[in-house]
Image (tube, rainbow, N blue to C red):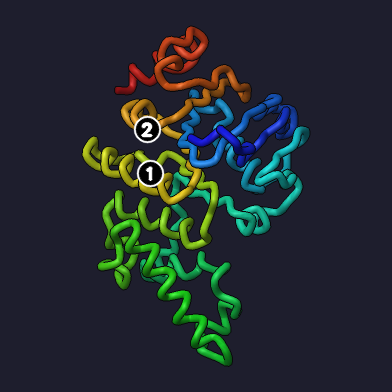
Amino acid sequence: MTKQNSQPLLTVKKLTKYFGGLQAANHICLDIWPQEVVSIIGPNGAGKTTLINLVTGVFPPTKGTIWFNSKRIDRFPQARVNDLGIARTFQDLRLFTNLSVVENVIVSARQTVQAGLIEMMTRLGRSKKQESQAMDHSMEKLALVGLEKKAHLYPFNLSAKEQKLLAVARCLATEPKLLFLDEPAGGLSCEEIRELSSFIFTLREKGMTIIFIEHRMEMIMGISDRVIVLNFGQKIADDIPARIQENEAVLAAYLPKMENKS
C-alpha cells in the first residue's frame, strides 16, 4: 500500500444508485490507493457487485462521482473505462467456450491490436503482423498465470482454478492499473486459495491495485491491506483486517453469517 506522496488511484464520492424504488448503493465514499489489495465484503444483496458495476461503467450512478487517476469517469461507457485501465472478472467468468484459451485472451487484448477482429481473423492487410503481436502478448499473460502450456485447449478442458486464471489473464491483456476480482476463491481448495493469494501479491509487486469481492475469510484476512464492509448498500466499515474482526457493526451484519457457512 503506497499512500505516502501519492494521490488515490480511485475515489468514489457519495455514490448512489436506484433501480426503480430500490436503493442499491447509498452515498458510498471510498479512496483506493496505488498498489493496495482491498477486499469488499458484506451479506448477499449488500451492494458489492453493484459497486463494481458502477465503477466499471456497466451502468451510471444515480448520484455521486467516480474519479480514476484524477479523471472523472462516472459517465463513461464500459469500454472507455476499460481503456483507461480498469478491468474486472465476473462470478460466472464469461469465457468464450468456442474459442481456445489463447484466443480468449487475444479477444481481450484489443489495446495492443489496431486491426479489427474480423480483419485479424481473415488475415487481411496489416493484420498478420498485428495478429502475431497479439499472440505474443496473450501468451505472455498466459505464462504469467501459468497457463501457457494449455493455450490451445478450450476452457471446458480446464479445471475450475484454471478457468479463473484464464479470466484473470484476459483482464491482464488490457494492461490494467486497477483489477476487480469478483469472488475469485469460489470453489477453490485451501491450497488453491493460498496459490491464488500468492499470485495476487505478485500482481501487486508489478504495480497493480487489486479490489476483490470474497466470502472466504482465510483469503480476506490473509491478503487484504484493508477490508471494506457493505450492508444494505451502505459502507459500514473500512479498516485493516484485525480491526474489522472486532468491529461490532460488522459482527452484527456479516461475520456470524460467514461463520455459519464455514
**Circle 2 SS class:** helix
Q: Does 67 appear above or below 250?
A: below
- Residue at screen point 68% across, 57% down: 80
Marks 1 and 2: in contact by CB < 8 Å? Answer: yes
Residue type at mark 2: give it. Answer: Ile
Tell me where residue 201 appears, x and y as whole percent. 37, 42
Q: CA distance from mark 2 to mark 1?
A: 8 Å
Neighbor class of circle 1 (other Cα within 10 Å; few <14, some 14-19, many 20+) is: some
Q: Quadrant of residue 33?
A: top right
Query: Residue at left 47%, top 10%?
Result: 247
Above or below residue 248? Residue 37 is below
Label 1: state its secondary structure.
helix
Quadrant of the image occupied by residue 189: top left
How busy is the neighbourhood of tag 2: few (under 14 within 10 Å), some, or many (20 plus)?
some
How far across and down, in percent of the image, does residue 118 sit? 57, 81
- In the orientation shown, which residue stands out farthest toward the left? 191
The amino acid type, in three-letter code, at marker 1 is Ile
**Residue 200: assigned label:** 1
The tag on residue 61 is none
Q: Seen in the image, is 145 located left or right of residue 3? A: left
Q: Is residue 142 visible?
A: yes
Image spot of residue 208 (x, y percent): 48, 47
**Depth check: 95 or 147 in front?**
147
Label 2 sits on residue: 223
Q: Residue furthest top?
A: 248
Q: Is residue 50 at all visible to an observer of this figure?
A: no
In the rendered structure, the answer to whether residue 220 lies left or right of residue 150 reads right
- The image shows residue 125 at horizontal and vertical percentages of 58, 92
Q: Nearer the viewer, residue 21 or 129?
A: 129
Quadrant in the picture for the C terminus? top left
| 177 is higher (above) or lower (below) than 1 | below
| Of the image marks 2 and 1, the number of the one nearer the N terminus | 1
